[in-house]
Image (cartoon, rainbow, N blue to C red):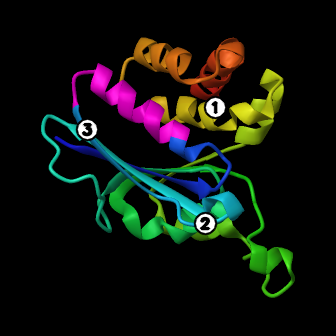
Amino acid sequence: MTKSILICGVGGQGILLSSDILAEVCMNSGYDMKKSEVHGMAQRGGSVISHVRYGEKVHSPLIGEGGADIILSYEKLEALRNLSYIEKNGTVIVNDMAILPIPVASGEVEYPQDVIDKIKKHASNLVVIDGLGIAKSTGNIRTLNVVLLGVLARHIELAYENWLAVIEERVPKKTIEVNKLAFESGYRSK
């Protein structure tokens, strides 16, 4: 059976590194894996989306509408924008954080109110997390993406040790310990 995970957020949040880590954990766990990314204006704070699919045999990297088992969103408006991807009984993991898009920051439009409540209406399984607060508690807010991978790891059956091994390989050497702490903190969060 193929698992489909959509990771979304805003440029600069570490989504591409996160999807690389997830993909490598899947491969190290013996699964066939396919990955695809959309990051057009990512460097300017635009949307970033990564599709990761793994299983015995995966034929396409893209997740169709209604086909994601899990959406992992690093920013709450991005979760709302991508809800069409979640399957009926899928899980949406949302970092309760707002990053203002340029039209909002410039005053052209307003950031939508009650984003989490709107997500609740469409997601039967919703996990809302204060990823930034957890990252701050590790001593490095730049570990936000790894905190959120820890939360994701609770919801998929990939060995904890594989996650730690890949994180150790993929993050800068001087940040290995803080990233391991971030992953563990996300994994153990409520």
The chief SS type of the magenta part is helix
Query: Does 189 sit left or right of 61 as displayed?
Result: right
What is the crowding at mark 1: few (fewer than 14 residues within 10 Å), some, or many (at least 20)? many
Give the residue number, with chain letter if any, for mark 1.
147
Splitting the image into 4 quarters, where does residue 99 fall? bottom right
In the rendered image, the quadrant that contains the C terminus is top right
Asked which secondary structure carries label 2, the reply is loop
Residues 13 and 56: in front is 13
Element class at badge 3: strand
Q: Position of residue 16 (x, y in %)?
A: 52, 44
Label 2: how many residues lie within 10 Å, few (<14), some (14-19) or many (20+)? few
Give how far apart the Cα atoms at labels 2 and 1 are. Answer: 24 Å
Residue 37 lies in the magenta-colored region: no
The answer to whether residue 86 of the structure is visible from this angle is: yes
Residue beneath the point at 29% across and 26% down: 27
Decide which of tag 1 and tag 3 comes sooner along the chain.
3
Query: What stretch of residues is rendered in magenta?
Result: 17-31
Q: Which residue is denoted by mark 2 in the rendering?
A: 41
Which residue does the numbered mark 3 point to in the structure image? 33
Q: Which is closer to the viewer, label 1 or label 3? A: 3
> Residue 46 at what x, y percent from top left?
64, 65
- Give, as a three-letter code, the residue at label 2: Met
Quarter in which the N terminus is drawn: top left
Marker disc for residue 9: none
Query: What residue is at 44 percent from the left and 11 percent from the top?
Result: 161
Q: Amino acid at mark 3?
A: Met
Q: Amino acid at mark 1?
A: Val
N-terminal-most mark, 2 or 3? 3
